[in-house]
Image (spheres, rainbow, N blue to C red):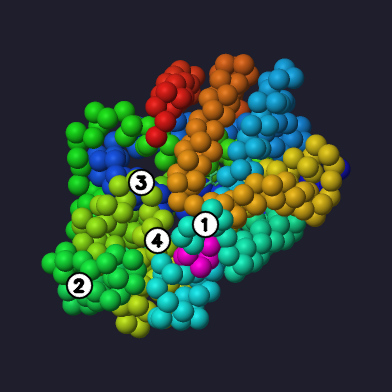
Amino acid sequence: MAKKERWASRLGLVLAMAGNAVGLGNFLRFPAQAAANGGGAFLIPYLVALLVMGVPLIWVEWAMGRYGGQFGHHSTPGIFDSIGRRPYWKYIGVFGLWSNLIIAAFYLYIESWTLAYAGYSLLGGFETTSAGAFFDRITGNFPNSIWAFSVPGLVMFALCIIINIFILSRGLAAGIELVSKIGMPLLIVFAIIIAIRGLLIVPGVEPITDQARAAAGFGIIDPQAVASPFEGLRFLWEPKFDSLANPAVWLAAAGQIFFTLSIGMGSIHCYASYLREQDDIALTGSTAAWTNEFCEVILGGSILLPIAVAYLGLSQVQEMTAGGSGFGIGFMTFPTLFQKWGVLAPVAGFLWFGLLFFAAITSSLAMGQPIMSFFQTEFGLSRSKSALAFGAMLLPFAAPVAFLAQGSFFDEFDYWAGTFALVVLATAEAVLFAWIFGMDRAWAEIGKGAEMRVPRPFYYIIKYVTPTFLILILVAYTFQPA
Ligand code: PHE
């Protein structure tokens, strides 16, 4: 069996875990979900979900992972097995591997777009090509065809998968940890630059021409529509409290919390399994979670909508985000809008897609590592063979994504794999840890080596409140598909 791997430093671990959580969900999904589900009022169910499910489950997953790691298990089936002591638990844990694999297939595809867009921005391509046309070219989105692929798109997708496999094959410290140490700080710096520049847009002074708008795929828009970027913030944050009466809003908030914190996937189990028995998880786990919340609510909330509203006007943006996705704006509109940015114009696209790329790759690595660890620990394969095994497992899922995926596919996918599956695994693990393993032992595990006292109410939250909420949500999801 391969020799024991560890994280090299505390900072590296926090950045890797934060990188795991901070992803496309923070910058493209969150603002659109919030805007579509009650604006500022969305934060109420969002915070409730964070406190009764997000934070408790972060501690649960870290504790389970660290526990299983002591027995040499680094992926969910083995970790569940070491805790559940009944043969069927490891099969339930396999669920976590499949959802990682399936989500990785589509996530890596989008990641490959960010890479293509970043490169093309830097080459100055968007000065002449509209972002919409580039999107069609890269995704192979051609009218009247059931096929949706292009050769450049396939090449970028393959390249992106190869980069991920290569990084994974270098091992934890020299791979994921190193990439996170470089990528996370850059991502935050890039995001801050874009956010500040975006908020400085003076409405009307740098109006985007009708021609550019048409190129971005919007047709001619009422010139009166241009607004201040702060209108965008208002659109995002102004609470519409009547939305709280709608159960779908609560489900959306829970779904966002799961996806953004990477809960219910087994990827936190895997990362945490490389801790030592006495390493703190109480403080480190919450630090990673709060870093994600900063990158989501503050950074993610200050880019997409302010910039889009400043140039396109409120009603256009409202329409584009009604479905809760920011992809259209992020990929189809932004590169064209950035051409207005004076000195920043040549690099703004690179900064934006670069930040999305770092956000994405530190997440896709977190989807690959559990599968790779599974081959390493359960089959005794070497690191590079396990990384290749991940690539091989990915292919049957990546192929349909690459050849067939079009608009509505992504929405269905987002719902079943990106949300529903996560709640299923989270429910299983909450019951397993608090009720089968036993809450007193679970509490002792969470508190082991702790550098921060986990507030006592969380004992009861983890034991009663979290499982109750999870089961309710599971029932609601089953009967009320999006
Ligand atoms: N949390 C990531 C995001 O917000 C997605 C993710 C889910 C990453 C599950 C790893 C595991 O985009």
Query: Which residue shows up at 39% across the image and 61% down it?
Result: 330
Query: Which residue shows up at 49% across the image and 60% down it?
Result: 141
Residue 447, position as x, y percentages in the image:
56, 30
Q: Which numbered disc, 1 or 3, marks the residue closer to the eye?
A: 1
Q: Nearer the viewer, residue 386 or 442?
A: 386
Which residue is the site of mark 2? Answer: 202
Label 1: few (<14), some (14–19) or many (≥20) C-alpha neighbours in 10 Å? few
Q: Are marks 2 and 4 in contact (CB under 8 Å)?
A: no
Q: Is residue 453 at all visible to an observer of this figure?
A: no
Q: Secondary structure at mark 1?
A: loop
- Residue 372 in the image: above or below residue 76: below
Residue 413, position as x, y percentages in the image:
51, 42
Query: Which residue shows up at 62% across the image and 49% down it?
Result: 400
The numbered mark, 2 or 4, whose residue comes first in the sequence reads: 2
Q: Secondary structure at mark 4?
A: helix
The numbered mark, 3 or 4, whose residue comes first in the sequence reads: 3
Q: Secondary structure at mark 2?
A: loop
Left or right, residue 480 beside residue 70:
left
Which residue is the site of mark 4? Answer: 330
Instruction: Tell me the CA gap for discs 4 and 1.
Output: 25 Å
Q: Main secondary structure of the magenta part?
A: helix
Quadrant where the N terminus is found in the figure: top right
Instruction: Tell me the CA gap for discs 1 and 3.
Output: 26 Å
What residue range appears in magenta?
135-140
Which residue is the site of mark 1? Answer: 145
**Disc sitting over residue 324 in the figure:** 3
